[in-house]
Image (tube, helix red, strand yellow):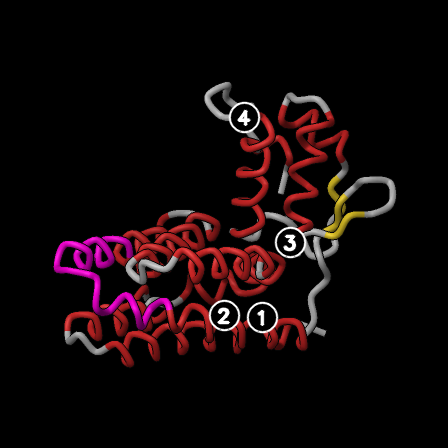
Amino acid sequence: MHQSDFVPVSSRVTIQDGVYRQLRDALMTGRFDPEQVLTIASLAESFGTSHMPVREALRRLAAENALEIAPNGSARVPAVSKARLDDLCRARMAVEGLAAELAADNLGADDIRELERLVAAHEASGRDESVYAMLARNREFHFALYEGSRSDVLIQLAETLWLRFGPYMRMLTRNVEPILQSREGETYTRHHHAAIAALRRRDAAGVRQAIVDDIAATQDLLRPFCD
């Protein structure tokens, strides 16, 4: 990611929170390469801030295992491996599968229509926008579904796992973008459609299985590109 893509932090939020949120979103949507080094000085220049809020934001992200902090205070995006990918996907299936299952009893017709709108936006972004926009729409769908679980704990765990999954999202943008953009929308959102169909049936186990299958499909796409 080019650090010039960051925007100045508004006074409406604390500077540290603004830096943290932008870095967090960038990590979750695969904007940084695995093992990329992020220096405090360059980030502070990009955000138009002093070093302190950047340092504190990097520490927060390191506490969530999204970054690794070097002795000089710079941060590094974690490396990727098959073992780490498999471990993260196993955890995601457990946490996100349960959140999806719990959502089945709580989401009404309006909620389901909103999920359908998000799937349509995801498919449109795959045809007409960048892969980053597509991944952002994908995240919106997942967390709109998980909100239906009404479990703050599960949602927080899912967010942490997505942060740690950031380097693999970057691999999607680099290695899988031609595959994703060459397919019809219903191919790469088929599990989202399956989840919505299960929600309409009030089939909690079916919703969970659709999300597990979605994560497994991403895992299968990524494994050939990991050491």
In the image, is 96 to the left or to the right of 176? left
Q: Specify which label sits upstream in the sequence, 3 or 4.
A: 4
Vertical placement of residue 34 versus 99, above or below: above
Q: What number is the disc on residue 88? A: 1
Q: Quadrant of residue 4?
A: top right
Q: Name the residue carrying label 4.
A: 14
Q: Quadrant of residue 204?
A: bottom left
Q: Amino acid at mark 1?
A: Leu
x then y, percent, for residue 162: 52, 59
x then y, percent, for residue 73: 81, 40
Spatial CA distance of label 4 from label 1 is 31 Å
Vertical placement of residue 217 versus 8, above or below: below
Q: Amino acid at mark 3?
A: Ala
Q: Are marks 4 and 1 in contact (CB under 8 Å)?
A: no
Q: Are marks 3 and 4 in contact (CB under 8 Å)?
A: no
Q: Name the residue carrying label 2.
A: 92
Q: Nearer the viewer, mark 3 or mark 4?
A: 4
Q: Name the residue carrying label 3.
A: 66
174, 169: nearer the viewer:
169
Q: What number is the disc on residue 96? A: none
Q: Residue furthest left?
A: 109
Q: Specify which label sits upstream in the sequence, 4 or 1.
A: 4
Q: Are marks 1 and 2 in contact (CB under 8 Å)?
A: yes
Q: Residue at x 38, y 72 (%)?
A: 98
Which residues are drawn in magenta?
99-118
Q: Nearer the viewer, mark 2 or mark 4?
A: 4
Q: Amino acid at mark 4?
A: Thr
The local secondary structure at tag 3 comes to: loop
Q: Amino acid at mark 2?
A: Arg
In the image, is 69 to the left or to the right of 152? right
